[in-house]
Amino acid sequence: MDLLSLWDNFVSEIRSFFKEKGYIEVSTPVLLDFPNLDANVEPLSLYVKEREIKKKWLQTSPEYSMKKLLARYKRDIFQIAKVFRNNEWGKLHRTEFHMLEWYAINCDYRYLIEEIKQLLKRIFGFKKFEVVSVEEAFKRRFGSPIPEDEEGLKEILRREGINYEENEDWETLFYRAFIAVERDLGRDYPTFLINFPERLSALAKVREGYAERFELFIKGIEVANGWSEETNPEEVRRRLLRESERRNLPLDEEFIKAHEDMPECAGCSIGLDRLFMLWLGKDELITF
């Protein structure tokens, strides 16, 4: 079977999975008035002539638009979308790629983990999975708990010969170290990483100091990122404002306001190009 047919079958199987579970497929704008404010993702901007020249943004994920739909319709929804990220290249990265994103109402991140297990069993035939905390994964690789301060992380980076800048914050230093952790995850079978430190909560609910968030790794490659959604608009504002000010990017007030009507829910995104690559048994993204 040729590559185009394999991709078609692969995407069709994913669509069938979600439709059979009662999800509604949606389509949202790719071109946005405001950027996604993801801490480790750089958005792409462009200028559009609409009577006057306006600066717009290509979505780095359909999250904001889909959550606005959630607030209005309160239905389980999914989407396979094209997304765009600046400063991305290499064997596992592209500026433009396909993202599967979905939201389940009245559910939490644990429900999504079980749902992904069902999807992976169907597509890959996987029978075993591992669930491990971020703290435990860090200990396995470095032999110590996650340091609370920047200096502790710098000490680990120096010991491992990993370069860093002296003025980098805790989160940046953590992710520099965590690259070494990720390489070992999901080698034997898919691994779900849970119990993220509160400082890495993104827009996830936080309980008892940990974010209700997970990431999925297969053969050392991050494939999925999901969480129980924070629905308090003031808390969402606080987190996004911090990121907006740090990076001098505009804030989408309509997105924040949508949380006033947001149902309790959980959401997840999967990089489909990476999942397809793994399904084919390859170690780098496919070029059609």
Image (spheres, grey):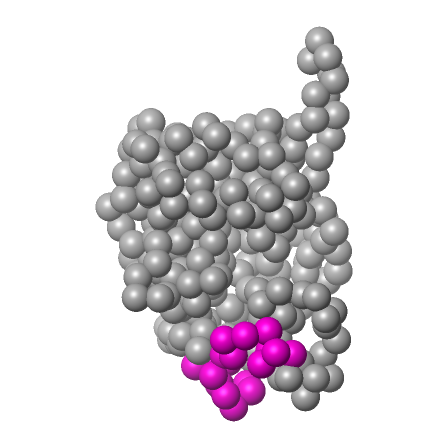
Question: Can you say whether 203 is above or below 143 in the image?
Answer: above
Most extreme residue toward the left, as rendered?
Answer: 106
Q: Residue shown at 39%/53% (left/top)?
A: 204
Q: Is residue 41 left or right of residue 270?
A: right
Residue 207 in picture, x, y percent from top left = 30, 61
185 vs 177, nearest the viewer: 177
* Residue 98 makes an appearance in the image: no
Q: Does residue 164 appear to the left or right of 212 in the view shown?
A: right
Image spot of residue 41 (x, y percent):
63, 51
Q: Is residue 226 left or right of residue 34?
A: left
Does the magenta segment cover residue 141?
yes
Please say if 233 is above or below 90. Answer: above
Furthest residue to the top?
51
In magenta, the rendered stretch is: 136-154
* Image coordinates for residue 64, horizontal then vertical, percent: 48, 37
Identify which residue is drawn at 48% across, 61% down. 200
Q: Residue at x 72, y 53 (%)?
A: 88
> Taking 240 as reference, is 176 above or below it?
below
What's the magenta bit mostly, secondary-structure-wise?
helix
**123 above or below 86?**
below
Front-lying residue, 83 or 206: 206
Task: Choose top left, top right, bottom left or bottom right for residue 34.
Answer: top right
Residue situated in front as seen by the camera: 277 or 194: 194
Residue 164 appearing in the image: yes
